[in-house]
Amino acid sequence: MKKVSPLFSYLFHPVFTPLYGAILYFILQDTSLEIRQIWLVLIQIIIITIFIPIAFYYLLKSMGKINSVMASQINERKLPLVIQAVLLFILAKDSIKVDVLEELHYFFVGGLISTVISFVLLFVKMKSSLHLVGISSLTAFVIGLSISNQSNYLVLISLMILLNGIISTSRLEMKAHTLKEVIVGFCVGFFSQLIVWKFWL
């Protein structure tokens, strides 16, 4: 497990969560969008939630504000989380419209809520595992889509639950987080999505 732990940490880095959520949405949900429009949405998400944060990461690293892409220290996490919150707000407000992509819109709203909660927790010296925030958000989103579509996504949901366990183990094996931080991360991500369920389920 020690050899593959870094692989899971990078593959399921929280920066990829919005993209994974959108891909799952377009696979599982019937939409009126054409393929060209779907690609346009995915490209917007990639630019706003991956390319721009990576650019900010290198800027912050060059300024000595952050040491690694994992942002292991509490003080290193504050500014990246603020940036992430702003980008998610822009994405939900201007790109993923509630009247066109309702479920996906609220997935990003839930992501914004979990980002804000993770930011607030830093002021009480509590780190939440952002990897678990991400994967648990995806898990809750898939469960929500299953309920909304009245479809049996049991295999996919089981896989998502397994990934929660694998990523938790990975973060613990790498000593990136304590068990408490992993549990907090899971709860923040999962329950932030549950909060927005009432708006689209």
Image (cartoon, rainbow, N blue to C red):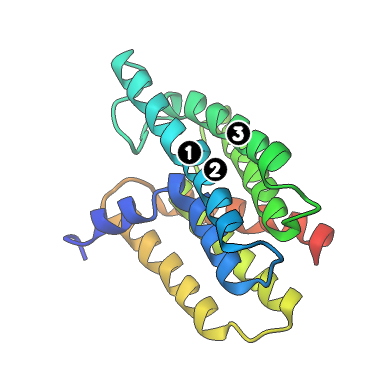
Q: Which residue is drawn at 57% across and 39% down?
A: 118
Q: In this view, does 47 lie to the left or right of 28?
A: left
Check disc 1 and give the amino acid type: Ile
- Please state which of residues 91 and 185 is positioned toward the viewer in this rendering: 91
Q: Which residue is drawn at 47% across and 44% down?
A: 46
Q: Residue at x 45, y 44 (%)?
A: 15
**Mark 1, residue position:** 47
What separation in Å lies between label 3 and label 1 (alpha carbons)? 15 Å
Q: Position of residue 147 (x, y in %)?
A: 73, 77
Q: Where is residue 139 in the image (x, y as percent from the top left)?
A: 56, 66
What separation in Å lies between label 3 and label 2 (alpha carbons)? 16 Å
**Mark 3, residue position:** 85
Q: Is residue 193 left or right of residue 81?
A: right
Q: How many labels does the image show?
A: 3
Question: Which quadrant: the N terminus?
Answer: bottom left
Q: Which of marks 3 and 1 is in front?
A: 1
- Looking at the picture, does residue 194 appear above or below residue 96? below
Q: Position of residue 97 (x, y in %)?
A: 74, 47
Tell me whether circle 2 and circle 1 mark residues in contact (CB < 8 Å). Answer: yes
Secondary structure state at the residue bearing disc 1:
helix
Q: Residue at x 69, y 42 (%)?
A: 92
**Mark 2, residue position:** 44
- Please state which of residues 62 and 51 is positioned toward the viewer in this rendering: 51
Check disc 3 and give the amino acid type: Ala
- Please state which of residues 119 and 112 is positioned toward the viewer in this rendering: 112
- Please state which of residues 57 and 126 is positioned toward the viewer in this rendering: 57
Check the image and name the residue furthest to the top.
Answer: 63
Please tell me in which quadrant of the rendered image residue 170 appears: bottom left
Q: Earlier in the sequence, mark 3 or mark 2?
A: 2
